[in-house]
Image (cartoon, rainbow, N blue to C red):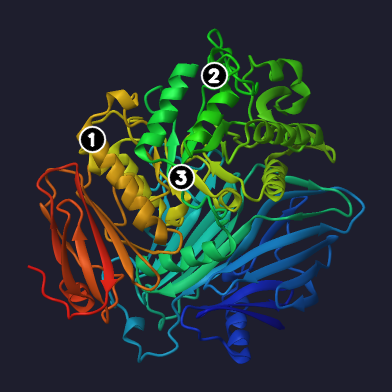
Amino acid sequence: MQSFRFDAGSFIWQEALYDGYYVAVGRSAMGRCLDQEQIRSRLERYFGAHESISPYAPAFGLEIDGALLDGRWEYVGHTPAETTLRHSLAPVEVRIHTQTDGSEFLARWLTVINNGDRPMRLSRVYTMSGIIAERISDSWSDPKAMPGAGAGPDFELGAFRFAKPLREGEFYWQPMENNTIMFDIKSRVFAPPVFVVKNNLDGESTVVALEWSGNICVEFRKDRNPNGDWWVPPYEGYISFKAGSGAPAPQYVLKPGGQVQTPCVHISMCYGGTDDWVAKLHDHLRRSVTPRQPEGKRNLVEYNHTGYTRNAQITRELLTREVDMAAHVGAELFMLDAGWFGGADTPWYEAVGDWEESPLLGGALPEILGYARGKGLKIGLWVEIERAHEKSKLFRSRPDLFARRGGRATCLLDLANPEAFEYAYDEIIRLIEKYGLDCFRLDHNQSMQTGGEIVNGGCVEHTQWEYYEKLYALFDRVAARYPGLLLENCASGGGRVDYGIMKRFHYTQLSDNWSPNGSINILNGMTLALPPEQCMPIVGAINMAPADTPYIARAGMFGHMCISGVYPSVDECNEDGLAAWKHAVGVYKNQMRAIIDTCRVYHHTPFQDYTRRGEWVVLEYAARDSSLIIAGFFRQSESAPAGFEFVPRGVDIEKDYEVTLDNFRKTARVSGYELSNSGMVIRLNGMMQSELVIMRSVCGLPARRAV
């Protein structure tokens, strides 16, 4: 038996090679490890009398050429970051990579190597698997180990509703009975593949996240202890999981001597509530997943031109008005969205793939963008580089560049084809250079399903896996060439927001649901899985639904702020409405921007049911040193209580705070101790109204009680 231990803060994960099986044998959120005797005892329980548990204990899963390689592994070598195994029957070598970054998460991926002389077909691939919770009566003195310890389900699984466009960020819980819950998704995923198993018996939460943009297959299984001994309480059992890619077989055909890296899994366990696992996840993402925005371009207020035009074909006059409006409201980055290509007889959506300026602009686009720069605005451009419409010149002239399925060309570039890859790269570089872009906005409006198909190794291989390998490589290459370039993601709104993409893009549009309530609900939910600086709601006249103007503007302030449409032109502004927008932009620039990319997020209303109008959405962002706390309050319905009892969670009880209610522009001085114990009641008289509370620490005279 060889055993391996990985520590990430107080999270410990232990594995062992035992009788040819590489097994996940121990886990702890309290920093307590198993000793060698305990490991051996647990392994004997898994593979002895409890033999039926063994299919769920292996720490990874590979099915190659139709055979599940769950055993007969031999030890080759080990470093703190890599364990190498070789299969005794198949010519397969697996390198198990485990990365720690100072946070409380582990990152795990595999390198699979074909040491044979024939192509190797990868079918099912689980990067990481194993038992993550179990009920063992080691001591009858523990009251939680006795039958009837608590009401309700012992375990619950939290996940997003992945296939729901316009409902991104809807996180829900379901009880885990003695069953299997599987997420086997072969279409676009409209939320990050992030899962939380909540143990209601001891308060432990396990977070599992998959870093992958393609099809996913993630499974959670709950079983009773299978031996049926009389002394085992009836609710005892275990939770196991599997996480990996999920395209139809074969997902990948590995050439002799070739190797492939599997999607990465991120995992942690912790005690506490939602705030705790969210904080640990954000910390991990900021350390080693999400890229930091370039200096001089961090968290710019963005203005997307399409608010009043709805992506209509753009004329020079219209675009100039939009630039003036962006500068007038205080924006810093002007985003030229769809409609800059195509023409009077060719709407932009039929010209996708032909990235040439619309004749309606009369060749003036470089001049107009120069005009915007003269007003202090940086420039961004929308491109859907991966797709071409079937009527486009590109699709008709170069069908060889496109992925094929069932013998027919799809509208997606085949990035696994070196010619198509270089074409996409050259086009991106050409546009960046031609227009001097500060930001490149990538959209993706096609469901890949299972990707293209090619004949490889005597079989039909689905190419989605290699497609995403190449897409990642494409934008890694772009970022290396232009380290100061902002990369903005979009995919029919929030259709591709996984960590594989967000490792390469600075922020993402969250949704095409631009309604006031939709915007804040989706932001509230998505910040469970993504730090707020990566979350871009789009607010403004892009949605014409009525709401109080500060409500709409504040819904954008708690993410990467992007406005799309304030007024049709500077001359048509309403003075009071414009003042509300300018005030929100000023608060974002001068206060929110100082903390948003390092803040701790507290969700006071974390889980919203999108099928009904909610009551309140309340978000609190706190600086790491508790010197500045900003909280937003959004009353969504008339049936909601008029007052929300708010006890801030990010204050320091040793500090005093100036507490400002933004609606009234009134400030009171209150001690942190009083705030963290008594809090305050935020009152809003009607639905679709909001409040912003800003708490800034101060020194000097003792705090006085707020009236």
Q: Distance between the residues labelled 2 and 1?
A: 32 Å
Neighbour tally class for label 1: few under 14, some 14-19, many 20 plus, Cα within 10 Å: some
Q: In which quarter of the image is residue 653?
A: bottom left
One can see residue 520 in this view: no
Marks 2, 1: nearer the viewer: 1
Residue at (31%, 54%) from the top-left corner? 607
Q: Is residue 415 above or below residue 507?
A: above
Marks counted in the figure total 3
Which image quarter is the N terminus in?
bottom right
The residue that mark 1 highlights is: 577
Q: What residue type is labelled 1?
A: Gly
Residue 600 pos. (x, y %): 39, 65
Which image quarter is the C terminus in?
bottom left
442 or 598, nearer to the observer: 598
Residue 271 pos. (x, y %): 40, 75
Residue 158 pos. (x, y %): 40, 58
One can see residue 108 in this view: yes
Residue at (60%, 37%) from the top-left corner? 437
Q: Residue furthest front?
A: 374
Residue at (85%, 53%) from the top-left corner? 258
SS class of the residue under badge 2? helix
Q: How far apart are marks 2 and 3 (CA)?
A: 29 Å
> Closer to the N terminus: mark 2 or mark 1?
2
The residue that mark 2 highlights is: 348
687 or 125, nearer to the observer: 687
The residue that mark 3 highlights is: 162
In the rendered structure, the answer to whether residue 320 lies left or right of residue 436 reads left
